[in-house]
Image (cartoon, rainbow, N blue to C red):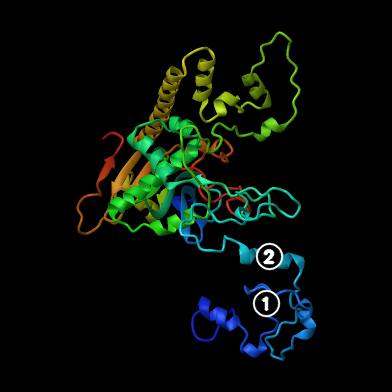
Amino acid sequence: MVVKIRLARFGRTNAPFYNIVVAHARTARNSRPLEVIGTYDPIPRKDPYDTSGKLHKDIKLDTLRAQYWIGVGAQPTDTAWRLLSLVGILPPKYPRAGSQQAPSTTQSGTA
Amino acid sequence: MPPRIPGGGCRPQQLLTSLEAPTPSCTLPAPALALRPRQPPTASSSRPLSTTPRCSSKTESTKPPPQLTRVRRKFLDFLEHSSMLRKSKVLKEPTYLSNNVVTRSEGEVVQRDMPFPNNPYFRSQSVLSAVSRERVWSEVMEGGMPIKAVAAKYSVDVRRVTAVVRMMEIEKRWEREGKPLAYAYARSMGHLVPQHNVRAESKFEPINDLHVHSHTMQQLFVPTSESRHFTRADAARAFGEHILPPEARMRIPELVDMERKIAQGVPPPVAGAEFIAAARESEQEIAARNFERARSKEARTVRVQTDRFEFRFEKIDSEAVGPKGRSRTAVGWRYGVPLMDRRRAEVKIPTSMD
């Protein structure tokens, strides 16, 4: 059976929250997966005490496990592919026509 | 749909007029609570039911009109002669009933902080005045005093001191930004509750109270040898591995050290200075710990800037779910366990401030 990397929707009505999971393709969306490799909070948030009004989204990801599952043939869904390509685990699936390069990535801890 | 009052929105004045009796001829015995000059009790006023004419309107109440009882008469007396109802030019303290009524009918003394004289359990707690809040903020932010030292100096809880500093910072930021602030509202709200002005000697509230952990409420018999030096730390450990001794649980343990030094003969000014230094050191430790926590989180985070949002990828360890996959510390929504966040009496507002 195909193993997929996909999102499992939890949270509440109008307040989604996703687990990034590795699961068999034919199992139900929220059933117990093979592994939870991260979470994705799709609601844009502001930093506390920040007046600039910039929004960010929080994602937690075990990059090593994601790379392992990609390496053994797990197939990410489009949404999961987009998230994984943001950190460079995968090439972008649908590169934007105007932009030639990937979005800028900063490792804030090393700076 | 709730019943609407004809003629647009529900305005209080309309509500009042619509609730009033339609015509003066229909008004039945004038309500006994109305303010009017007192008349000596006559035969007619003692039996208002039988002497007043009844009205056949549909708005008439079926309840009998209130009788002029002794309590009601005393209340009318109070309404007429009370100084509370007269407008005073300067409101310096809240106008509670207890400011006027000295004793209750049973002869018990009514304290000044009782808004309701018949309810001795309702006590109106005083709040820090605006001047006090300004002074607390100034000592912490301008004077650079440790928060624990300010709390000990004015006998205000550490948590309240931090809250005052936070709120004052917001207020001052809004003043700088030119936001309109509700000063008049704050002033009139301040007249409704007693105010406290901080001074170096006056106590506002107890500051070193210990939280009584429920594990320590049981009666416990621990056999020990007679020669053993059984300390408070040992007693705490007997109640549970995670129970701490009182000196580790109190908010300002440096105060105990200061008093101990004074008891040993150190002059109080010297002990006080050492207390301030110790408080400052402990707060710097906490700040350094918080800084280190934030720094290590930043080191685990990769920020990706896109057109619309910044995506923050934090690196985690998915093995933290444990061998059974049900660990509480694991990342993500848990499987196979109910989420009790909507259970009754569950605290949903944040209880701490980061």
Callout 2: 10 Å neighbours few (<14), some, many (20+)?
some
- Tell which subunit mark 2 falls on: B
- B292 and B261: which one is in front? B261
Q: Amino acid at mark 1?
A: Pro
Task: Classify the position of the N terminus of chain B by image quarter.
Answer: bottom right
* Location of residue B173 in the rendering, given as x and y in whole percent from the top left corner: 32, 49
Above or below, A50 relative to B41: above
* Location of residue B20 in the rendering, given as x and y in whole percent from the top left corner: 60, 82
**Left or right: residue B64 compared with residue B18:** right
Q: Earlier in the sequence, mark 2 or mark 1?
A: 1
**Left or right: residue B93 compared with residue B276:** right
Same chain, labels 2 and 1 = yes
- A81 and B175: which one is in front? B175
- B92 and A71: which one is in front? B92
Q: Which residue, given by chain and number where applicable, does mark 1 sit on?
A: B31
Residue B82 in view here: yes
Q: Amino acid at mark 2?
A: Phe
- A54 and B222: which one is in front? B222
Residue at (65%, 19%) from the top-left corner? Answer: B234
* Location of residue B334 in the rendering, given as x and y in whole percent from the top left corner: 55, 46
* Location of residue B99 in the rendering, given as x and y in whole percent from the top left corner: 60, 53
Confirm or deny contact between disc 2 and disc 1 (CB under 8 A).
no
> What is the C-alpha distance between the residues marked 2 and 1?
14 Å
Q: In terms of secondary structure, where does tag 1 sit?
A: loop
Instruction: Give residue B75's mark.
Output: 2
Above or below, B335 relative to B3: above
